[in-house]
Amino acid sequence: MKWLTLAFLVSFAGLFVYVSADLPDRGDPHAPANEHLAAEFIELTAEEIEIPNIVSAILADFRGYDTLGETIVIFTAGLAVLLVLQTGYKRND
């Protein structure tokens, strides 16, 4: 059973490496996210939002629901870890 699990994990890691070859390079100025969204966010931040920091404006306004969802996922994962670790703890009363 260990060999089957190991073979599955190695093949899964190989799949990730194969798929990651198709991703754009980091910092590529011609990547789709840099060509379309970045310029639009910069323009809209200056015009519509009165937050001087562009990063805060994007996270708080343009991607607010996404940031809230990520926060909920991290909170839920932390709560699950605490509940799992607490099940092994027994009080001696």
Image (cartoon, rainbow, N blue to C red):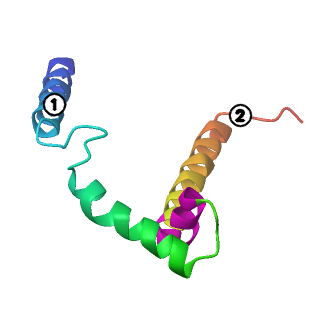
Residue 11 placement, left or right of 93 = left
Position of residue 18 measured from the top left corner of the image (x, y, whole percent): 9, 34
Determine crowd level at label 1: few under 14, some 14-19, many 20+ residues with C-alpha closer than 10 A.
few
Q: Residue at x 90, y 36 (%)?
A: 93
Q: Which residues are magenta?
A: 54-66
Relative vertical location of residue 9 with respect to residue 22 in this rendering, above or below? above
Q: Of marks 2 and 1, which one's residue comes earlier in the chain?
A: 1
> In the depicted view, which residue is nearer to us: 74 or 3?
74
Quarter of the image for residue 81 reads: top right
Position of residue 72 measured from the top left corner of the image (x, y, whole percent): 56, 61
Q: Quadrant of the N terminus?
A: top left
Residue 86 placement, left or right of 11 = right
Judging by the rendered image, the residue that carries numbered circle 1 is: 17
Position of residue 69 measured from the top left corner of the image (x, y, whole percent): 50, 65
Q: Secondary structure at mark 1?
A: helix
What number of labels is visible?
2
Q: Is residue 65 magenta?
A: yes
Judging by the rendered image, the residue that carries numbered circle 2 is: 89
Q: Residue at x 19, y 21 (%)?
A: 6
Q: Is residue 55 magenta?
A: yes
Quarter of the image for residue 9 reads: top left
Q: Residue at x 81, y 35 (%)?
A: 91
Residue extending furthest right? 93
Closer to the eye: label 2 or 1: 1
Q: CA distance from mark 2 to mark 1?
A: 40 Å
For badge 2, the amino acid type reads Tyr
For badge 1, the amino acid type reads Val
